[in-house]
Amino acid sequence: MNTQKPDLKEDLKVFTHDVRALRDEVRLKLHLASMDLKQEWENLEPQLDRALNSAAIVSGEVVADLKKRLQEFKKRLGPN
């Protein structure tokens, strides 16, 4: 029985797409990034992988936290 709200399912779908796109962007830019950003990404990436692999059971609160952290990281990473 699926107890998730439809909007959460859509949020998870969008979140998964955004994470994968950001991962691709980060891999392209990481060689130019500062050591602080490299370390931050190394800490954040495993958490993103866990969230993507268990998206069906991730709560809205977890998704919101990861979205916030990704946006902060993306701002620090710089322009496209």
Image: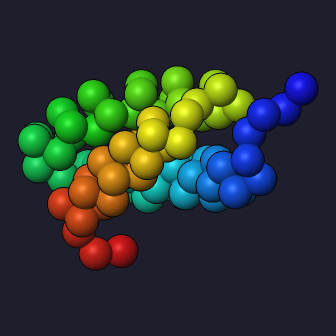
Residue 29 on image: x %, y %: 32, 57
Vertical side of 25 occupied by 3: above or below: above
| Residue at x 18% of width, y 33% of height | 39
Color scheme of the displayed model: rainbow
- Quadrant in the rendering for residue 56: top right
Specify the quadrant that holds the N terminus: top right
Q: Nearer the viewer, residue 54 or 45?
A: 54
The reply, left or right, for residue 8 in relation to residue 61 is right
The reply, left or right, for residue 28 in relation to residue 51 is left
Kindly give the residue lying farthest to the right in the view shown. Answer: 1
| Residue at x 46% of width, y 55% of height | 22
Q: Nearer the viewer, residue 33 or 42?
A: 42
Vertical side of 5 occupied by 29: above or below: below
Residue 59 on image: x %, y %: 55, 34
Residue 7 on image: x %, y %: 70, 57
Residue 36 visible in the shown view: yes
Specify the quadrant that holds the C terminus: bottom left
Residue 29 visible in the shown view: no
